[in-house]
Amino acid sequence: MGLVKIDDRLHEQARRASTVMCRSINAQAEFWMKIGMLAEANPAMTFNDIVRTQLLQAEHCPVQPTRA
């Protein structure tokens, strides 16, 4: 696991979004990074297409236990 330095304004935006989406700030930033990476790799897909694809893939994967 690493440490990522981000701009204070972006951190504040992540904090606000995390509150609305009921995620931690780290989980919100990870979500944005994952969606951004997938959007770059699949430029023809919309945000909704990406989320739908991820949900379908999650249905076919066993739930991973969380680490304590």
Image: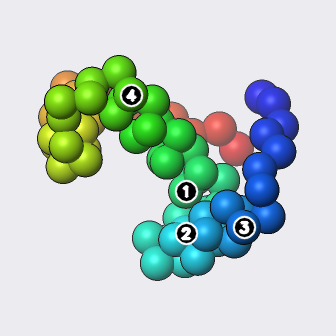
Whether residue 55 appears in this view of the structure is: no
* Secondary structure found at label 2: helix
The residue identified by callout 4 is 40
Q: Residue 63 appears in which quarter of the rendering? A: top left
* x, y percent for residue 38: 37, 29
The answer to whether mark 3 and mark 1 are in CB contact below 8 A is no
**Relative depth, front residue between 7 and 59:** 7
Query: Is disc 4 surrounded by few (<14), some (14 to 19) or many (20+) residues within 10 Å?
Result: few
Please name which of the two marks, 2 or 4, marks the residue nearer to the observer: 4
Give the residue at x 66% y 53%. 26
Horizontal relation, residue 37 to residue 53: left or right: right
**Front-lying residue, 8 or 68:** 8
Q: Position of residue 27 (x, y in %)?
A: 58, 53
Circles 2, 1 touching at the beta carbon (< 8 Å): yes
Q: From mark 2 to mark 3, how far is it between C-alphas?
A: 14 Å
Mark carried by residue 41: none
Say which mark, if any, is on residue 9: 3
Residue 28, numbered label: 1
Amino acid carrying label 1: it is Gln
The residue singled out by tag 2 in the image is 18
Instruction: Tally the marks.
Output: 4
